[in-house]
Image (cartoon, helix red, strand yellow):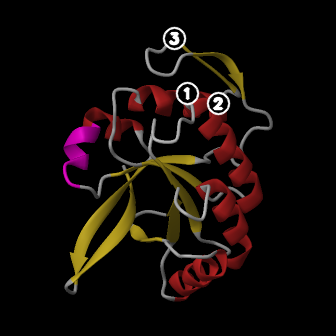
Amino acid sequence: MDGGPLRFLQANDVGSLRAEAVRAKEEGVEAVMVGSGPLGDPFVLLAGLGDAVPGLTLAARVVLGEDGRHPALLAREATSLDHVDGGRTVLCFGPPFGEGLDEAIRICRAMWREGTATSEGPVYPVVDALNRPRPAGDASPLVALDLTGPGARDEAGGSAALADMVVVREEAGGAAVLRLERV
């Protein structure tokens, strides 16, 4: 996927979330994204949607520090989703971006590519975090940064160069369109 349309899914119940995902696929959207919210965990919700939208990229949007999950845990959760969805997973970090963003990306990548990660911190210290089994594909999961919020691009700074993809907002035909683009 490169520059394809992305739909951020929000609904009041799982049935409506599934229907919104199916409608997005029918409308030619190439990726769907779910964040933490009233329905629960984005990884669990996307795992439940995967069969309903074969071929779509599935992005779990998280905000570092907001829900207290360490990047080593996020890497393992993304790996599990990657196995369930057959290698279609994107872990998307949303703003606010703090000083630990680079560190978080490096921890996730090490766990996915080498199967283990060690970081001396300063934000996310971890020693020999294991990731078994490894992700479904050699090139998955991918890391994205959501740059659609006010000032998000400036806030992300050089971290954007560490990501595989970015979420951007464009105006098309008088409407805002989200795109997931390779860096």
**Above-or-below relation of 26 to 156:** below
Residue at horizontal 74 percent and vertical 73 percent from the top = 51
Local packing at callout 3 (Cα closer than 10 Å; few below 14, some 14-19, many 20+) is few
Q: Nearer the viewer, residue 116 or 13?
A: 13
Local packing at callout 2 (Cα closer than 10 Å; few below 14, some 14-19, many 20+) is many
Q: Earlier in the sequence, mark 3 or mark 2?
A: 2
Q: CA distance from mark 3 to mark 1?
A: 11 Å
- What type of secondary structure mainly makes up the magenta span? helix
Secondary element under disc 2, as helix, strand or loop, is helix
Residue at horizontal 53 percent and vertical 76 percent from the top = 11
User: Which residue is labeled 2 in the image?
Assistant: 111
Q: Amino acid at mark 1?
A: Ile
Residue 107: mark in rendering: 1
Q: Is residue 30 magenta?
A: no
Mark 2 vs 1: CB contact within 8 A: yes
Q: Is residue 153 magenta?
A: yes
Could you say which quadrant of the image residue 57 lies in? bottom right
Q: Is residue 87 found left or right of 7 in the rendered image?
A: right
Residues drawn in magenta: 150-156
Q: Nearer the viewer, residue 154 or 9?
A: 9
Residue 120 image position (x, y, % from top left) = 51, 11
Residue 17 image position (x, y, % from top left) = 59, 77
